[in-house]
Image (cartoon, helix red, strand yellow):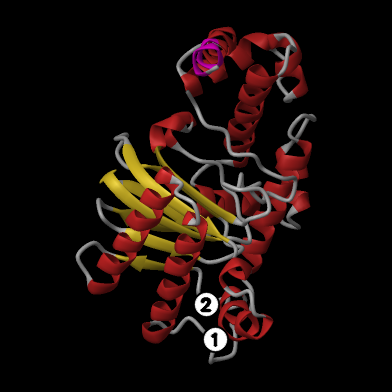
Amino acid sequence: MKYNIKIMQDSSEVIPYDLPGLPLYVKETYLSVFSKGRALCHWHEELELIRVKEGEMNYRINGKKVPLKEGDCILVNSGQMHYGYTAGNQDCRFQCVLCHPKLLAGNSVLYRKYFLPVQENEKLEYLYFPEGRNRGVEMGRAMEDISQLSEKKSPGYELVAVGILTMLWGRLLENFEMLPWESASPADPDLSAQRNMVSYIYRHYGEKLTLSAIAESGGVCRSKCCEIFKKYLQQSPIDFLNHYRIEASANLLAHTQLSVTEIGLSCGFNHPSYYSKLFAQNYGCTPGEYRKRRKKTKEITN
């Protein structure tokens, strides 16, 4: 069964917290659950921790590529455009922990002193922890402990998980220049344009979009638009648009009774045959077959 990230119109991800109202999310999964082994580009206010358990994966943060091997960990700062995808078409099992900084610092003084400056540190997009290094071992152990706590769900496990993350944060502050002691560098205009263009696509994907309209939403020309998408997403603007349209249509196939034709049209595909062809390229089956598979999966789980 494929996995669909729920994206808001500003390209931020809606995080399905383990417990409503508690900004903590823990999951272990495979890249193969995403269409073509590639998650949608997104951002969120939560800090994100990723640890590769089996295989390899590539991670992109604001266009920067970070190859992750088995045992490697990465911490992505708040507000960064990022996504993971397969390395060499091989599958990868990984752990993911998302946590809002305010959960770790219930005291407003501690939050302003040790978390907010890190979130606002434009020089700190991510931290990479290779497997085997001291900090990487510590990060991996913390991720494994939190994953096991989440799986067992013993009474009070959330408190223990938050305690582990808080101690880990304190240790990171000791050894990394996470706080912006120096003046922050100017924001990258290309990254700002990229976020605006991605947000525009998420808001208007069901409409007839042109390359010119996408470029205009970022305040750049068409050639610059293509250059920015290639730089940050390794896709053309139209390929990214179609990828999101397919993801949106898969969600409608699984959760509505609309016909395949209606879904294709609502997601911006004017020709049913082209929609079916593109869907098959992404999911390995037709839209109708995908709907049947999802229906069977629901019946089994229920």
Residue 123: which numbered mark, if any?
Answer: 2
Residue 180: which numbered mark, if any?
Answer: 1
Residue 102 percent across, percent down from the top left = 63, 69
Q: Does the magenta stretch include residue 300?
A: yes
Please report whichever mark, 2 or 1, sits nearer to the chain's N-terminal start: 2
Residue 31 percent across, percent down from the top left = 40, 37
Q: Does the magenta stretch include residue 53?
A: no
**C-beta proximity under 8 Å, tags 2 and 1:** yes
Label 2 residue SS: loop
Front residue of this view, candidates 203 and 214 = 203
Residue 50 percent across, percent down from the top left = 41, 55
Q: Is residue 199 left or right of residue 84?
A: right
The residue under the point 66% across, 67% down is 189
Three-letter code for the amino acid on which mark 2 is drawn:
Lys
Q: Look at the picture and state if 18 lies above or below 288.
A: below
- Magenta highlight range: 296-301
Label 1 residue SS: loop
The residue under the point 50% across, 56% down is 156
Is residue 212 shown to the viewer in this render?
no
Residue 16 percent across, percent down from the top left = 61, 44
Residue 53: which numbered mark, if any?
Answer: none
Three-letter code for the amino acid on which mark 1 is drawn:
Pro
Type of secondary structure dominating the magenta stretch: helix
The residue under the point 54% across, 13% down is 290
